[in-house]
Amino acid sequence: MSSLHIAAEKGEVAERILLPGDPLRAKYIAEHFLDGAKEYTSIRNILGYTGTYHGVPVSVQGTGMGMPSISIYVNELMDCYGVQKLIRVGTCGGMHEKVKLRDVFIAQGATTDSGMIRSIFGSSINYAPLADYELLSAAVENAKRMNLPVRVGNVISVDRFYDEEIDNNKLRAYGVLAVEMEAAALYTLAAKYGRQALALFTVSDHLLTGEKCTAGERQTTFNDMIKIALETAVG
Ligand code: HPA
């Protein structure tokens, strides 16, 4: 039986999954990187596919933007379909001079202003959402082997894309390198279910310089990130 937001039958979703925010990125990954990919869901046009990579079953599922949206999908993927390894493949904004436009960035930890995390732990605990260490170290090793440079560090997962109140200078001063909108929820829910999660990004824009990737640049770095994610998922 399918779950509320995913139309797959049990067994149609692989234990290893890539999670882009944009459903058309899921389609792109399925068509360009997986063998024999078959669509298992299109509810709300949030597409999901399963195929194989080097003979290993891998799924790819759109999540939408923001923590409320990704939470719906990762909850159902873990609870209803038994997904074990979840790798987000997204974009982030660079916040620090240590991170450059077009870099591939990996979130080791995800600082957050999320109301969702606060509603789990209350205001007296500042929970630290972390990447799974095994996936993190494998991704770094895979990137080295493939000669693709990566940066690793703290991101902030924000609730609001348009946020004029947030103090980016303070975050930067404490070593937060990039901004995005999903990793903290992914890491927290994976921890709750005892599963492995990692978030990889391409730096699509930079808050310090105002630079933005062109469409062509986005595609090239996106492809590099997908290769790292897939090698890590099947490793
Ligand atoms: N802010 C939040 N999320 C993002 C950004 C940003 O600048 N760039 C890519 N994802």
Image (spheres, rainbow, N blue to C red):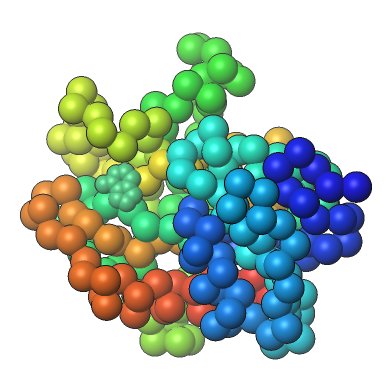
Q: Is residue 209 left or right of residue 21?
A: left
Asked if residue 95 is positioned above or below residue 24 in the image, the reply reads: above
- Could you say which is closer to the camera, residue 115 or residue 35? 35
What residue is drawn where x is 18% and y is 27%?
164
Quadrant of the image occupied by residue 110 = top left
- The percent position of residue 68, horizontal first and vertical second, equals 54, 33
Asked if residue 210 is positioned above or below residue 145 in the image, the reply reads: above
- The percent position of residue 74, horizontal first and vertical second, equals 66, 45
What residue is drawn where x is 87% and y is 56%?
9
Is residue 38 visible in the rendered image? The answer is yes
Can you name the residue that lies furthest to the left here? 209
Q: Quadrant of the C terminus?
A: bottom right
Quadrant of the image occupied by residue 29 = bottom right
Q: Is residue 10 left or right of residue 86?
A: right
Quadrant of the image occupied by residue 34 = bottom right
- The percent position of residue 151, horizontal first and vertical second, equals 34, 64
Is residue 230 visible in the rendered image? The answer is no
- Could you say which is closer to the camera, residue 202 or residue 124? 202
Asked if residue 41 is positioned above or below residue 158 in the image, the reply reads: below
- The percent position of residue 70, horizontal first and vertical second, equals 56, 42
Asked if residue 42 is positioned above or below residue 188 in the image, the reply reads: below
Numbered disc total: 0
- Could you say which is closer to the camera, residue 20 or residue 191? 20
Q: Is residue 65 left or right of residue 204?
A: right
What residue is drawn where x is 78% and y is 65%?
14
What residue is drawn where x is 50% and y is 64%?
24
